Structures are given as C-alpha cells and as structure tokens.
Amino acid sequence: MKITIIEAPAAFICRDAYWNQLAEYLDTQASDVLVLNELPFGPWVSSRENYHEIDFEQSMRLHKEALESFDELGVETVVGSLPFLVNGKGINRSFVWRREYASLEFVHDKQFIPSHKGYHEARWFQPGSTKFGVSTIGEFRCAFLICTDVMFNEWARFYGRCGVDIIFVPRATNITTIDRWKSALSMAAIVSGAYVASSNRSGANDAGGSFGGSGMLFSPRGELVAETSHDEPMLSVSVDLSATRKAKEDYPCNVPDLVSQTFFQQFIQKEKNYDDT
C-alpha cells in the first residue's frame, strides 16, 4: 500500500492553490491513502483563547465543503480529523473516507486536550467518546492517535496488541517542538510494531509562532522513513504488511503486558456505534 503524507498551509481550503497542487501530485503517484493533518481546513480555531460559535461553525462548513470534494483528489482513501458539535460541545473526530462508498467511517475521538498559548483546545473541544477504534484499509488494520494522543504510549502499545498495522497521527504542532514529536512518533511505532504516518500544518499560527510542517512516516521499528519539507511538502511511501507482522514478534512488542488484554478491549468501538452525531 502506498501512503501520502503532507505539510499543508495553515489556511488550507478546498480548491485553493495547495489543493490543486495536491490533486496534481496525487495524479502522478498512484497513492492509496492520503493522510491529512489535524482539522486541516481553514484557520486553527484553537489559536483563540475563547470559544466563538460562529468560528466553530465556519470551521465545520469548510471541512464539509472539502469532504464533498474529496473525489477530485486522485486517491482511493483519505484520513484525517474533523470538527463536530455533539450536544453543544466540540469534538475532534478522526475519519476514513473511501471513494468506493463515498462515505465516512468515524474511528476515534481525540482524548487528550491541551490548553496553552496557541492551543486553547480545552476551550473549544471535549474528549468525546472514550474509544480507541480499529478500522481496515485493504489488508491493513489501521487506527488513530490525534496529535497529543500520541504522547501517551500505552495507546500505541494497545493498538499493537490489537494487530494494528498503521497508526495515523494528524497533527497541528509548533515548529519549535519538531524533535519532541519525532521522538513521540518513533516510540509509538516501536511499542506498537506498526507504521506511524503523520501530516502537519505549516506556516504562521494566528496566536503567534509557526506550525512546524514535517509530515513524517516511521517504520514499525521506529525508523524515520520519510519527512516532508518546504521544498517537498508531499511525499508518498510504499509500506509492507510483512514488516509490521515481523516487528510484533520481536522486542519490545513481545514483552508481556502488566494487565490483561481483556481490560483494553472495552476501548474498541466501531463507527456504527457512534450514535451521538
């Protein structure tokens, strides 16, 4: 399977110059999966300290417009995260879009919500459904850790125990913290024995500072396989199912758990069980 990672402009919207560039790039790659960054379309609403309903609704509208145009992109599957309103509260929810069905599967809600300058997410979002779901793309089992979620390795290890082959990590992270995120993404791959594919925003944050770009893909051994840059904002890499299966048989994935795997099964939930949207 071939995966495309990107670093997208901070104000990426449907049919802008970057969208057109991305569509042209995908037409040349025969890629199977496009990994978008966290809440990719429009401004980063959490840069503002206080919640504004009109801004949240605009963000949802921009994402809806893009979703309805995914068939313009030369790829069979698109993954990322979207803003939702559930009972008046914001949810950052991961999705899998498949051309074959022209529909969305919702897999996981962001659980770990930061609150600091430029990232006042706790004012805009709540954790949502406390489930760490597993989906399938072709022969690959896949799952999500949305941005800060990946800092907590127990969930990457949990996904590895579930037989996950790819963990998607949509990000919106600062340029000053790239090394920290490389460490987190690499460790997620190591403890799960899965590929980790992550895309990010780039350019100015409305609250000051800059998003860091650097979409990255790590092997199941934690090795950095590909990293985007300003000069190469889109990269496509083929991944090998056998590599994930072999990594899970080796150290450290083969070290026994402290608690029964049955304990973790309660956190698996499929898209069909989302009844709050």
Image (spheres, helix red, strand yellow):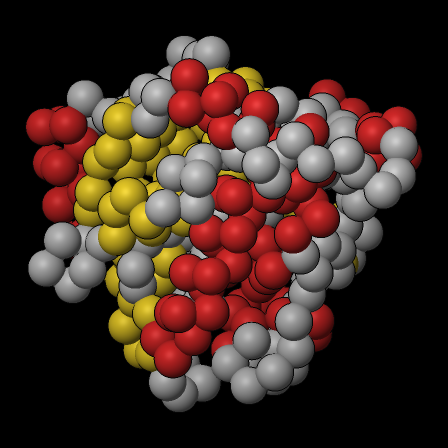
Q: Residue at x 60, y 40 (%)?
A: 252
Q: Is residue 120 visible?
A: yes
Whether 256 is drawn above or below 186: the answer is above
Residue 233 in percent (x, y) is at: 19, 53
Picture quarter containing residue 256? top right
Q: Is residue 106 visible?
A: no
| Badge count | 0
Q: Is residue 33 left or right of residue 87?
A: left
Q: Is residue 26 left or right of residue 168?
A: left
Q: Residue at x 69, y 45 (%)?
A: 155
Q: Residue at x 41, y 60 (%)?
A: 182
Q: Nearer the viewer, residue 83 or 163?
A: 163
- Quarter of the figure that contains the C terminus: top right
- Quarter of the figure that contains the N terminus: top left
Whether 174 is drawn above or below 261: the answer is below
Whether 46 is drawn above or below 74: the answer is below
Q: Residue at x 11, y 36 (%)?
A: 24
